[in-house]
Image (cartoon, grey):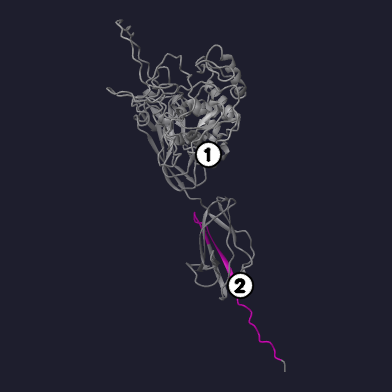
Amino acid sequence: MAAQFGRRVVKGAATTAVAAVAVAALSASQAPGVTDTAQGRQTAGSQPSSAPGADDSATGNSPYYTDLPPLNSPTPTPTPSTGTGTPTGTGAAEAGIPATVLDAYKKAEAALGESKPGCNLPWQLLAAIGKVESGQARGGRVDTNGTTITPILGPVLNGNGFANISDTDGGAYDGDAAYDRAVGPMQFIPSTWEWSGRDGNGDGKKDPNNIYDAALAAGGYLCRFGWDLSDKADLRRAILSYNNSTHYLNTVLSWLEYYRKGTHEVPDGTGTLPSGRSDDNNGSSSSPTPTTPGTTPPSSQTPGGGGSTSPSPKPPTTTPPPSTPPTTPAPPTPTDTVDRLEDAGTAKLTATAGDAFAEKIATRTETEAGKAVAKVRVRFTIVGDTDTVFTGGESVATVVTNSSGVATAPALKAGEKTGDFTVRATVVGRAVSGLDYRATVTARQADALARTSDTALTCVAGGEFADQVEVKATYAGAAADGVAATATLIKAADDATANDKGPYFKDADGKTVRTLAGLKTDANGLLKLPKLYADDTAGTFLLRISTTGGATLTVELKVTAAPSSSPSPSAS
């Protein structure tokens, strides 16, 4: 692609300086002290200490498009429609985003705005990543449901110029049962999609090839760990976790800034296609799609493929190909030596709803001979019908084993759903049996109840009590919030059956009720009952309040007879 000064900046000696200036202003405050190689790969000393490994990032640090936006800012324009309803737009071609793709980004922003409002995810960030990862789904080549017309697959991650990630999905997502490949318009590797995948279009499926699903998953991925994307440091961390390259960070930031200045909608399939790719000069090659012996590769694209995937015919030659020197097998990685997972002394996992679990899960990786293996990534995944999460609000956490081969998961925070669930430990990049841990969430409890006032509760028959009953629930001396409670007007101290006479509550329709279920203490452990009324029966009555955990309190209610009315004296 020829460089067009003032309109488009691409790789090349004449434009490198211009590109550097364009990006420097965007990234100087967000990636200080980090350098790149000429290929957009980080140098050995530039990788942040908290950076994810390739098999624990969104894309596996796969190649990406390196085209930068034009230096001229786009002009925001309205989105008119033709008589047939086809979206159109004007302005710089690079500022146009295909209609369905743009809709997916905006819907993902809205969904994350509700589920994780503190993340402050802008749809323009999804657009910037979508541009860099797949050229906006190859210019918007998607069907009416948002699924790409043909698969978009990254190169085989076999260690040949890229990360080495052995197959984790049996080829279910990428069609390759030997190694993983990044999949779809947002380029998720299968192991990351397995836990981060979302159903963004409500069809009941989580498909990485669907732009609605992929955009929502990308938003959720960027919003994990409680990151606030309006904060520059968190924005930097989030983008680097997607693909751990500072060149990638700078490229995404440049498109983010460009889209924030204005964009417009273009018809699906008409978006501009990038050409430069981060691995253009690394000497590696990749087939466009997984193939099986005796078959022809289908027409799918890899990032940066730039068009047809049909091989060009080669002229006949009589020169024998040069012999390939034998290669020395690479030594096994620590992950390759793992034979099994063992529990590393995890105690019973129990917590009350809303509380943190006191115990943490610890798992040890071992060789076949029982030797501990350090520097292995262990993924902990919460499974089952539960709203319990790890610290930071995520259901998945990846931890590297220490020198003793032990990976300790972050603390678990119990949700409000009670019952049992499972935390499963697996080795990232290695097919060994997982290790399951059973955890239990119990209901919130109180062990004591007390009235907040000592005022006697009295009423005249047929009237209403002046004071409402309020109690405070505590557990081990501390306020017990969110504890379930029941209030019943009972017959006697030794008979908890609901009374059929005396004081009563009223339901929403004004009808008499003498048992209130489903009550719950507030954040301070307080519970205030509705107003009490008295029928025409005088006497002493009992109100019993009980909570989960066994706390009970019996309150005495007194109803006095109504004063008798005397006939008025008659005039003599």
Q: Residue 39 location, x and y as percent?
A: 50, 16
Please tell me whether residue 545 is drawn above or below residue 351 in the rendered image: below
Q: Quadrant of residue 541?
A: bottom right
Given the current orientation, which residue lies at the most extreme top position?
Answer: 319
Q: Secondary structure at mark 1?
A: helix
Q: Residue at x 46, y 17 (%)?
A: 279
Instruction: Tell me the kind of residue under disc 1.
Output: Leu
Q: Secondary structure at mark 2?
A: loop
The residue that mark 1 highlights is 112
Which residue is nearer to you in this view: 87 or 397?
87
Viewer can see residue 409: no
Give the magenta-colored segment's residue range. 545-570
**Residue 559 belongs to magenta span:** yes
Q: Residue 29 location, x and y as percent?
A: 62, 24
Tally of numbered tags = 2
**Residue 443 belongs to magenta span:** no
Which residue is nearer to you in this view: 46 or 459?
46
Q: Residue 407 location, x and y as percent?
A: 45, 30
